[in-house]
Amino acid sequence: MLLLLFLYAFLDQASSTSLIDTHTFSFPSFDPNSCINGSLICMGSVTAGNGYLSLTPEPNNNSTSPLEKVGRVLYHQQVVAWPVSFSTTFTIRISPFPNSNVSGDGMAFIFAQDNASSPPSSTGSYLGIMDPSTQGGVVQQLAVELDTYKNEWDPDANHIGIDTISIINPVAAESLNATGIDLKSGRNIKVRIDYHGWKKLLEISMAYSGDMLVRVLNHSIEMEDTVPSSVFVGFTAATGRVPESHHVLDWTFSTIPLPDLNNHGSKYFKMKTILLIVVPLIMGLLIVLICFLPSFRRLVKRKKEMVKKKVDIEIRSRTAANVPKMFTHKMLAKATHNFSKENLLGTGGFGSVYKGTLKDDPPTIVAVKKISATSKQGEKEYFAEICTIGRLRHKNIVQLQGWCHEGEHHLLVYEYMPNGSLDRYFGKKFLDWDNRFKILTGLASALLYLHEDSSNPVVHRDVKPNNVMLDEEFNAHLGDFGLARLLQNDDSVTTMLAGTPGYLAPEVGFTGKSTPESDVYSFGMVVIEVVCGRRSKGIMDENSLVDYVWNSYGQNELLNCVDPKLESEFDEEQVKRTLIVGLACLHPDSTQRPKIRKVVQIFLNPDEPLMDLPESRPSAVYITVSSSGSTTTTNIESKSAPQLP
Ligand SMILES: *[C@@H]1O[C@H](CO)[C@@H](O)[C@H](O)[C@H]1NC(C)=O
Ligand SMILES: *[C@@H]1O[C@H](CO)[C@@H](O)[C@H](O)[C@H]1NC(C)=O
Ligand SMILES: *[C@@H]1O[C@H](CO)[C@@H](O)[C@H](O)[C@H]1NC(C)=O
Ligand SMILES: *[C@@H]1O[C@H](CO)[C@@H](O)[C@H](O)[C@H]1NC(C)=O
Ligand SMILES: *[C@@H]1O[C@H](CO)[C@@H](O)[C@H](O)[C@H]1NC(C)=O
Ligand SMILES: *[C@@H]1O[C@H](CO)[C@@H](O)[C@H](O)[C@H]1NC(C)=O
Ligand SMILES: *[C@@H]1O[C@H](CO)[C@@H](O)[C@H](O)[C@H]1NC(C)=O
């Protein structure tokens, strides 16, 4: 029996998540330094200057022929290719040479297995991606080609494609004619490539700079089968018998890690599934056996111990990814000087939090949350927290280090956040704009990870400044998952109203059901509070703060509501965009709120188009709740009634 449990624990551990960090970099423009100071590896004909990268020689360069040239530029560090979702946006400009009626061959965005230059014979139609010697799977790579020359295998001289092992047989290709985009127009073209780690979908969108991006191609790709787990990313371009210039004007790239579930193969997975069925079955048999035996009590006691052990093993295996471990009460009492007043960091929810020093080598500082033993709700929260936060890995989520449950004692151990929680900074303490923006971006990334990118989507249900912890560099770490629910386990209407008034989306009050959209609402409230430097406590004030921001927006005086303590030391455009995002998130109709993915994109990319916002505060939604039998159905319809004065 125990053997089985241990086996189960082992298998679970084998398939548990691994720790990977988000990786983001951004080049708003390129100066000559970019190729020299080490942030980019520029190879072949690549030069930098005038704010952009030239991948192939320029028309005015008399020192070199523009023909049969190849250039490749890579970011100097490797990035994780899987298991992640990634998003990259860049602006390109492809121009024919003056007095030349034909041009070619085009350029590509590439995931390369190493930082070597393009192979020597990859000029012309090979676009610097591969050459005859590296075709057919000799190298592992993925390229999105922007092809301006029609070879016999191409749809036309204005298409995009996805290449892995062959240029002649791309895994996908699509003419750009339908989009109205002409690659060779010499105009700036914005390209966005997103990879959805869960859906395994590569999505390519394009538009002339300043226009709305249009989806051009969707394609399913198994990154695991295509490229190594770490790759170099960048661009290639090539010319052949005709010239062309290829510019990259800006570039942002970010990856969001996913728990690694699939790469341990289906063998483990199947065995785990079998064990998942077998273990409870044996458990059930055991219980039946126990009921028919005379020495009932003794066995019940043994059974209880066994169940407790199973819970321990289960928790341990669910959280075994890296650090989370079981602590003894004695250890934690010692670490916190017996939970002394001096070590008390705060009290709230269902327990108190203490600062503790673990006598590791070197000693580590932790935050220990002591759950009130008497509260049944507290115990529920404790398990909810271990089971959700324990398996989450993200740099903007507070990392659970371990737990302890001995008798009445229920304790959770987290990484220590030296700068406390965000709510402390309304009032005496000051945060500059850069830190505020960093915190909001981090918080949005955490929610994106919870909503879309972790194996089981999670709704936090209590997003508010008190639950946003700040590390020494003021990076946001979302914490307090006591109210969080796994989406798949919680399709029913919840009976208890969870969350905090002021941050609770209006529909939650009616339906009692939290959704990713209601988290977005709470996030919107945090955004405007942080920008305005004011709390919105209680329903009345909440409305007045939101109204105040809406009024400023309506009068085109959005900057009026910015925290006066910032003393105009901020990027005005960034502040405005942030406030507009906040207002959009606060839309009373949950279906009109932006997805958190869009919010993250706007925060990471200053060129990302904003969502449309009505001119004045949208009126409240009308919610009709009609009962049919025992189930409750809810219709939400938004109505644009005239604004009350
Ligand atoms: C190198 O130059 C680029 C572009 O000017 C700049 O963004 C980057 O911060 C620089 N890196 C270092 C290490 O100096
Ligand atoms: C001309 O091309 C050569 C070789 O690619 C390069 O080293 C040089 O910097 C270029 N000159 C200008 C003015 O772009
Ligand atoms: C290249 O030559 C042309 C004509 O001879 C001249 O106008 C141009 O300035 C030269 N360009 C460079 C970068 O030297
Ligand atoms: C391009 O121009 C050359 C002469 O300048 C001519 O021989 C050639 O046919 C033209 N090509 C096309 C595709 O028009
Ligand atoms: C290329 O990568 C290797 C290891 O991945 C590293 O040692 C080397 O310095 C890199 N070269 C450049 C030019 O960055
Ligand atoms: C796209 O338009 C060009 C120019 O009008 C044409 O030559 C080409 O065949 C078109 N491509 C497709 C796939 O229809
Ligand atoms: C790609 O998929 C999205 C939905 O994920 C859809 O809206 C879009 O129309 C698709 N585009 C293409 C070109 O297939």
Image (cartoon, grey):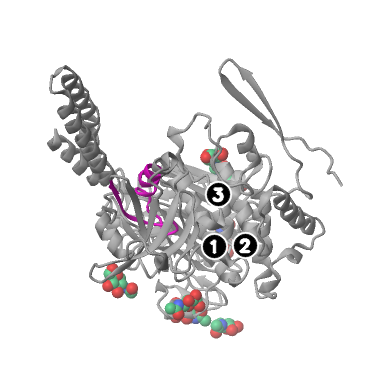
Of the two numbered discs 1 and 3 on the same chain, state the one appearing first in sequence: 1
Do callouts 2 and 1 mark residues in contact (Cβ within 8 Å)? Answer: yes
| Kind of residue at badge 3 | Ile
Q: Amino acid at mark 2?
A: Val
Q: Position of residue 195 (x, y in %)?
A: 44, 49
Which residue is denoted by mark 2 in the rendering? Answer: 530
Q: Tell me: is circle 1 under 8 Å from ligand 1.
A: no
Please give the residue where the numbered disc 3 appears in the rendered image: 596
Q: Which residues are magenta?
A: 382-406
Kind of residue at disc 1: Leu
Considering the numbered disc 3 on the image, is that residue within a helix, a strand or a loop? helix
Q: Is residue 361 above or below residue 485?
A: below
* In the image: residue 162, left or right of residue 18: right
**Residue 425 locus on image (x, y percent):** 58, 67
Mark 2 or 1, closer to the camera: 1
164 up-or-down from 186: above or below = above
Q: Nearer the viewer, residue 630 or 456?
A: 630
138 sits left or right of 32 in the view: left
